[in-house]
Image (cartoon, rainbow, N blue to C red):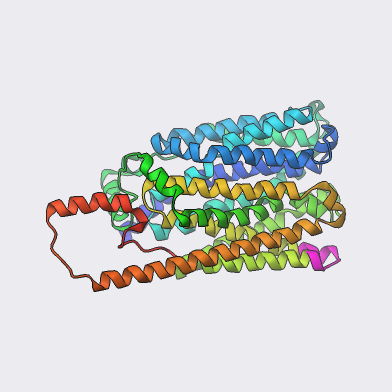
């Protein structure tokens, strides 16, 4: 057991810091446009009333279209090259956001940003699945996703400081936000080529004994150690599994609130009556609370080996936050609502995004399932950024907040369906195995069963879902 803990600690040190940093930068570079907006981006670019929302939606359209292809590329090649290359690409694109001069250029640069960022999150979730056993992934995904909440807090501090550069070099403060944060991403991406790990079966960060131990413990737990060849059969398997669609629809509901909240948080807070510089700083506490909530709740979830229950509770906390925003009149009370909404939204997302990585078996099927979850989920993000239109800001986004509650209720229903179906299926498989006689199998039968097990994946009678 001591050896396992040492091995996990070593893997954590090599994977979590760099991959969490890459995701923090990814989330920062996609959401810093919210900080730039309240510093005058829309005015300086002479944007039409709904052009800002359209630019956000175009990002997610591109993101959605390129996620599954990106994860298929990752499966066929190497994360050590692919993930840093993606980071370098979107860093350059992010930097270029600070150089746009009109609405059309903003549209195109957001499309390019969506294309280049699309592969990071599903790629990292897949990499986790070939290093950690199923029950070990949730906590790691939570630490990783905590980078999104920290990006909000970090982005608020950076935006406040960078805004003071307004006028330097003939550029506005909002332009410097994109330029400097893009340069930071490019610098980190170059270092990432030497730090991001490759596949577990050929990693150089472990000794021969450590790698053998890693593969042995993975083999006992799931298919992570299996060097599965790429076959389109497994891709089709993902697309025809109702559970994979369930995970995707679950994120669809939560993505609406995740991205509408993260991208409009500075605007929502400014709408409570605060100046732009105050709004930048006031995004820090709710995002910090969200990060703490993620880590504490996912620790509880891992300890009790429950996902659905805590996802539903998180949705409930977020709904209470939106109700407070709708029902109260004072800025202080509504700011409390912002904190509750942020804590519930980010925590629910952290839990649900790790769920298919724990429950989908077959490596290629899992890679496609994770990408499908993000792809279909982010269609909810497109809806969110289009619904939070400027004409609703005068009423403090009352109607969009009500729609957000509807999306959270939808996600609660999907989580309940997944929970009940998988619980019944686990029980059915237990009954079948309990009634079967134990038989001695020949070596040929064992080889045949390994092939069959690979084909069946999570539908194997011996497989148990994490609820």
Residue numbers of the magenta segment = 326-336
| Residue shown at the point (86%, 65%) measured from the top left | 330
The image quadrant where one finds the N terminus is bottom left
| 144 left or right, relative to 338 | left
Q: Is residue 88 above or below residue 132?
A: above
- From the top left corner, tell me how far across and down residue 162 is, in percent: 75, 39
| Residue shown at the point (67%, 50%) measured from the top left | 259
| Residue shown at the point (55%, 42%) measured from the top left | 22
Residue extending furthest front?
A: 240
- From the top left corner, tell me how far across and down residue 81 is, in percent: 45, 32
Q: Would you identify the image quadrant in which residue 336 lies?
A: bottom right
- From the top left corner, tell me how far across and down residue 321 is, in percent: 72, 65
Label count reads 0
Residue 303 visible in the displayed image: no
Q: Is residue 191 above or below residue 382?
A: above
- Magenta stretch: dominant secondary structure: helix
| 278 left or right, relative to 55 | right
Q: Is residue 76 magenta?
A: no
The image quadrant where one finds the C terminus is bottom left
- From the top left corner, tell me how far across and down residue 416 is, in percent: 54, 67
| 249 left or right, relative to 435 | right
| Residue shown at the point (66%, 57%) measured from the top left | 288
Residue 439 visible in the displayed image: yes
């Amino acid at each position: 057991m001591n050896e396992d803990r040492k091995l996990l600690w070593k893997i954590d040190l090599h994977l979590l810091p760099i991959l969490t940093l890459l995701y923090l930068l990814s989330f920062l570079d996609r959401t810093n446009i919210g900080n730039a907006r309240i510093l005058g981006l829309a005015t300086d670019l002479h944007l039409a009333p709904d052009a800002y929302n359209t630019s956000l939606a175009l990002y997610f359209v591109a993101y959605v279209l390129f996620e599954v292809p990106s994860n298929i590329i990752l499966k066929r090649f190497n994360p050590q090259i692919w993930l840093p290359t993606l980071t370098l690409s979107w860093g350059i694109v992010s930097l270029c956001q600070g150089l746009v001069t009109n609405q059309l250029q903003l549209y195109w640069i957001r499309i390019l940003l969506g294309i280049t960022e699309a592969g990071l999150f599903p790629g990292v979730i897949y990499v986790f699945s070939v290093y950690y056993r199923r029950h070990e992934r949730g906590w790691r995904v939570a630490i990783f996703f905590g980078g999104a909440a920290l990006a909000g807090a970090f982005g608020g501090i950076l935006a406040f400081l960078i805004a003071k550069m307004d006028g330097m070099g003939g550029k506005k403060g909002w332009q410097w936000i994109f330029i400097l944060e893009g340069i930071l991403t490019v610098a980190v991406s170059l270092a990432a080529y030497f730090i991001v790990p490759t596949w577990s079966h050929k990693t150089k960060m472990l000794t021969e004994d450590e790698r053998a131990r890693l593969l042995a413990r993975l083999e006992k737990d799931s298919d992570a150690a299996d060097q599965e060849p790429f076959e389109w059969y497994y891709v089709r398997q993902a697309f025809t599994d109702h559970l994979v669609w369930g995970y995707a629809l679950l994120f669809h509901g939560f993505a609406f609130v995740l991205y509408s909240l993260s991208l409009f948080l500075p605007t929502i807070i400014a709408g409570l009556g605060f100046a732009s510089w105050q709004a930048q700083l006031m995004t820090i506490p709710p995002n910090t609370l969200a990060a703490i909530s993620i880590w504490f709740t996912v620790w509880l979830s891992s300890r009790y080996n429950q996902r659905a229950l805590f996802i539903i509770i998180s949705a409930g906390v977020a709904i209470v936050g939106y109700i407070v925003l709708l029902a109260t009149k004072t800025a202080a009370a509504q700011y409390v609502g912002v904190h509750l909404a942020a804590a519930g939204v980010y925590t629910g997302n952290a839990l649900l995004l790790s769920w298919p990585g724990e429950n989908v078996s077959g490596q290629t099927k899992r890679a496609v399932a994770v990408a499908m979850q993000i792809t279909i989920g982010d269609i909810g993000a497109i809806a969110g950024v289009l619904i939070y239109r400027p004409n609703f800001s005068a009423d403090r986004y009352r109607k969009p907040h009500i729609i957000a509650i509807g999306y959270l209720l939808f996600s609660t229903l999907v989580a309940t369906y997944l929970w009940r179906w998988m619980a019944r299926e686990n029980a059915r498989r237990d009954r079948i195995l309990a009634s079967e006689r134990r038989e001695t199998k020949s070596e040929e039968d064992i080889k045949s069963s390994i092939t069959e097990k690979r084909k069946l994946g999570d539908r194997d009678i011996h497989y148990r879902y994490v609820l």
